[in-house]
Image (cartoon, helix red, strand yellow):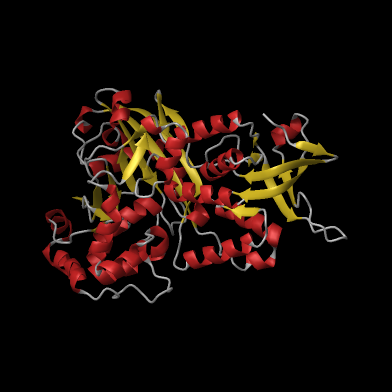
Amino acid sequence: MTAPDVDGDLAIIDVAVIGGGIAGLVAAWELARAGRRPVVLEASPVLGGCVGEHDVAGITLDSGAESFAAARPAVLDLARDLGLEDRIVAPAALGSWAWVDGRAVPLPTAGLLGVPVNALDPGVRRALGPWASARAALDRLLPAGYGAGAAGESLSFGALVRARMGDRVVSTLVEPVVGGVHSADPDDLDVDVVAPGLRAALAETGSLGAAVARLRAPLGPAGAAVRGLEGGVHLLIDTLRERLRELGVPILTGSAISDLKLVPADWSGAPEANPWRLTTRTPPAAVARGAAAVQHLRATAVVIAVPAPEAAALLISALGAPVEALLEAPDTTDVVLTTLILDEPLLDAAPRGTGILVARRSTDVTAKALTHATAKWPWLAAAAGPGRHVLRLSYGRGGDERPLPEAVARDPDALRRLAIADAATLLGVALDPASVTGFARVAWSSALPRPGTGHAKRVAALRTEVAAHPGLAVCGAWIAGNGLAAVVADARRTAASL
């Protein structure tokens, strides 16, 4: 492993990659393969961010992301480039459900974030009812520009769908899916960020249903919208770490960057060879072992690949007022993920397919989504064994003060009871608490950025300002959009820009 050069009290490096999540690791790997000499600086003791792993009752599971969109090829290409092609798997084609007004309804097998391709499909009619289905079908008769906003105008995803297909489609189909994917209300999300290309496809095809069909066409049959990895998506992090080590890339965990400055040119006006100065804050435990409390680095280039609050602080520190004016207050959601391992043969029939998404207005369930992981992934069912099931329930929506009621958040036993009760309600199966053989809780702070209306314009302006400073780049979900596919694609582009 190549250590940074030392010049006096400074460590001199080529590219400082701040953040060891999926975005930072991908950027560092691309830079190293291109001949640059990156150093990864991660504040926490572990790598991966929201792509992590944990052991629950003897089964190694994803503790964060467990699938990725197949519509965009970025993660598929990354997995192949990392030598994981034979690990790419599709979920079982069981379909998913929504929980609305105290009942479970199957979601359309062909759609995009809950928007159906065919509003008159029998499954859509059962979910919406005949009148709401007929209203949604009017989409085919409306002018192409109706509800789509003017060119360049910011528009929410919910507003577009409501104008084209009616309120019922939003409240029954779209809201549960968007809440499960983005932990947000569809009226709070920029359509061009969460569904890129949808407005352009609408203008060309003349209807929202046809636009969705066009965007879904590359996905093939139902069930092909997402992919996973046999063994878990966390294998991406494990493999990236190994590839970086093979390339001699230093990975320094416990290295929080507290300050980033651009060093001005010297008196002659000659540019600095290493113009970026970084200050690291060493954890108290390391200081107790004799490490310096504060260290300084000088770098030729810097990639900021940390969540929104940390990224905003570093950008303001480095660039000051010009970039501060472009940074809105980070709008993120805290998420708590609970995992249940059950010995329960009643779940063998996968009563609600691969999982169920919960509408915000539901009052009988606290969870926002449930994934029946052993029904969704055949490899996991085989690893768990007959009659043994893995359920993942997630808590936390945009606009909520906290993911869980305070009393539940403080008491692991209360959270376990809540998760069992929510799972029983959503799956329509009486679950015996004694059948639970494993339980885990993982909390993700600022886990899901919520790209509100106008987000795309603000991001474009921010990227322009950052690009005006050679050697500085930014990536990560808060700027690229939610989902591994968006984050990975943006990280690879970011590395290429340097």
Seen from the viewer's position, the closer of residues 353 and 32 is: 32
Left or right of residue 82: residue 382: left
The answer to whether 72 is drawn above or below residue 462 in the figure is above
Quick check: can you spot residue 63? no
At 52% from the left and 38% from the top, the residue drawn is: 48
Q: Position of residue 398 (x, y in %)?
A: 43, 57
At 72% from the left and 39% from the top, the residue drawn is: 282
The answer to whether 452 is drawn above or below residue 246 in the figure is below
Furthest-right residue in view? 267
At 25% from the left and 23% from the top, the residue drawn is: 386
Q: Position of residue 361 (x, y in %)?
A: 30, 58
The answer to whether 489 is drawn above or below residue 316 in the figure is above
The answer to whether 287 is drawn above or below residue 268 in the figure is above
Furthest-front residue in view? 35
Q: Quadrant of residue 407?
A: top left
Seen from the viewer's position, the closer of residues 134 and 480 is: 480
Q: Position of residue 476 (x, y in %)?
A: 53, 50
Seen from the viewer's position, the closer of residues 157 and 110 is: 110
Left or right of residue 460: residue 422: left
